[in-house]
Amino acid sequence: MALSENLKKKIIYPINEQLSKYLKHYDRYLNIPVTYADLKHYISSIPLLDKNGNDTLWESVQYSPTDMNELFPALTQIYALLKTKGDMSVMEHLRVDRVDYCTFGNTNPFRVRIINNYNDNYDYYYVKVADASRVFGLELEHILSPNRINYFVHEKTLIEEHIAGIPGDVFIKQHLNAPNVNEIRIAKEFIKFNERCLVRLLGDMRAYNFVMDITPDFDDVQYRIRAIDFDQQSYEGKLNLYQPHYFKDNRAYVELGMRHLNHKTLLQYQEEERTLIAMRVKASRYQLSDLIDCMNNSIVSTKEKIEQLKKELAKYYKNKDFLNCKNMGSIVQTCLDIIKKD
């Protein structure tokens, strides 16, 4: 059964002192010259349209000449911190081309477009409100998934790199029916992505919250689905919200699996992904332990959602250990303990 799209807007939870210490210890905390609040001082904006003239739900914002002279060099410096640990000698040919503001979503991020003056090549990064849920989501993605994440925090501001790929909803509309697309590999990847989200409790993975990363191989192409929105890390109470196959706008990916995979193959792919996650847990056990300890002492959801989720997980896994969990951190830990025992 498909899930309703009308989820309530998520609460933004502040980063507490313990999580701040964790971020500093693991080099995720840096001083920056511009904050999220500074970027809010724009004087006007215009809707940003895509190449087909459709509204993207982003606005291109403009600043006064005085603010631009201060903000844009500082934003270029932040890009240098993100990419080269602040080495400006290789950034002299870069400039800020545009700053966009998102009117849709939980944290209303800014997106900074950096352009190379020599060849007009460009890149993006994001300036967001530092939400504890999102930070935990980014860290769990970095530790437990096959993907590395580059970001850092300063007080109430989060700086996050752009994750390249074709948005999942765009891939369905424009690429899924292409003649050379490998439907079996896409179906396999969606099963594995679904398992990753469930094990580490990353919610709200509707098609526009992940991208399809396509890599040419020697005889075909490989597909990897990458989450790009981590706001719903360990927040919701309903178990189905942590399983992407229940969202109706992911239906096209589900249908590929129904068409090409049998039950034994599905179980094989799930077990493969759980095994890989268990190996990553073992490889990063000390950092992961520090992170879960931070989650245990952070508020990232409501008591009602915690109670609901632990009961649903206890029933799903047939494991009463979930009923003893007091917070979202202990629930995630119990999920990881289960795959380590498999």
Image (cartoon, rainbow, N blue to C red):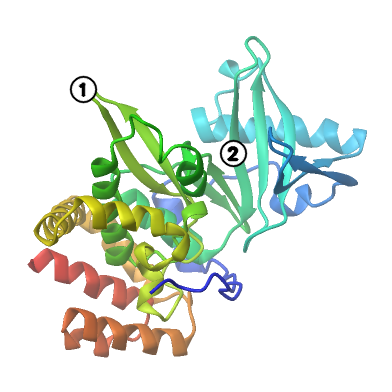
| Residue that appears at 61% across and 20% down | 91
Q: Secondary structure at mark 1?
A: loop
Residue that badge 1 annotates: 219
**Residues at marks 1 and 2 touching, judged by CB atoms closer than 8 Å:** no
Q: Is residue 91 above or below residue 70?
A: above
Question: Mark 2: which secondary structure?
Answer: strand
Judged left or right of residue 54, residue 191 is left
Up-down relation of residue 109 to residue 94 (above or below): below
Asked if one can make out residue 295 in the rendered structure from this viewpoint, the answer is yes
Q: Which residue is mark 2?
A: 125
The numbered disc on residue 101 is: none
Q: Is residue 197 above or below residue 41?
A: below
Write down the quadrant of residue 11 in the picture.
bottom right
- The answer to which quarter of the image holds residue 193 is bottom left
* Residue neighbourhood size for the residue with mark 1, other residues' Cα within 10 Å, grouped as few (<14), some (14–19), many (≥20): few
Q: Name the residue type under label 2.
A: Tyr
Q: Nearer the viewer, residue 115 or 164?
A: 164
Q: Quadrant of the C terminus?
A: bottom left
